[in-house]
Image (cartoon, helix red, strand yellow):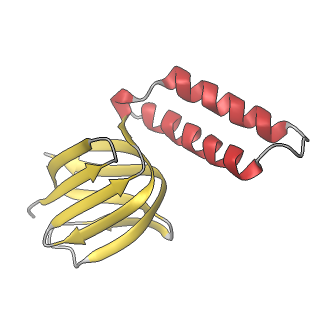
Amino acid sequence: MGTLQLEVVTPDRTVVSAEAEMVVCPGVEGEFGVLPQHVSLLSALKVGTLLYRVSGKDEHLFISGGFADVNNNVMTVLAESAERAADIDTARAQAARDRAEKRLAASDDSVDTARAEAALTRAVNRLRIAGLR
């Protein structure tokens, strides 16, 4: 079937540069898959799991939003942040989840609910991906 070049880049570094057999991304309108020779595509991404397959083995990345561009058999993901499952600090993610849940449980008007919900979403996704290792 072939492969496509996958590049996952954050403002700090290149997280993945690999020949992938397929990629599944968390698009803002729902998950979508990309195979080799995919038609050109540009999509906004939401917080979630980016799944890609290299040599028959599935790999998982946490990404917190960004954009995916597919063009000429190259898929470039520009992510706000990205972490491999093995690199996720589960203790830190659990602490972030607990803090967000505590903020959301408070009936205080000073709590920025949208920010706390976003933090909870990121923490839960990190923990889920870390559990896939």
User: How many numbered dots are placed on residues in this image?
Assistant: 0
Residue 72 shown left or right of residue 121 in the figure: left
Residue extending furthest toward the top: 91
Image point (44%, 38%), residue name: 129
Residue 72 x %, y %: 13, 73
Residue 127 shown left or right of residue 121 in the figure: left
Image point (14%, 68%), residue name: 73
Residue 28 in view: yes
* Image quarter in which the C terminus is found: top left
Residue 95 shown left or right of residue 73 in the figure: right
Residue extending furthest toward the bottom: 39
Residue 66 x %, y %: 42, 58
* Image quarter in which the N terminus is found: bottom left
Within the image, what quadrant is residue 71 found in? bottom left
Image point (33%, 73%), residue name: 42
Q: Is 41 in front, or is 54?
A: 41
Residue 47 shown left or right of residue 73 in the figure: right
Residue 57, relative to residue 35: is it above or below? above
Residue extending furthest toward the left: 2
Residue 89 x %, y %: 46, 24
Residue 133 in view: no
Residue 21, relative to residue 103: is it above or below? below
Image point (71%, 52%), residue name: 114
Residue 91 x %, y %: 54, 20
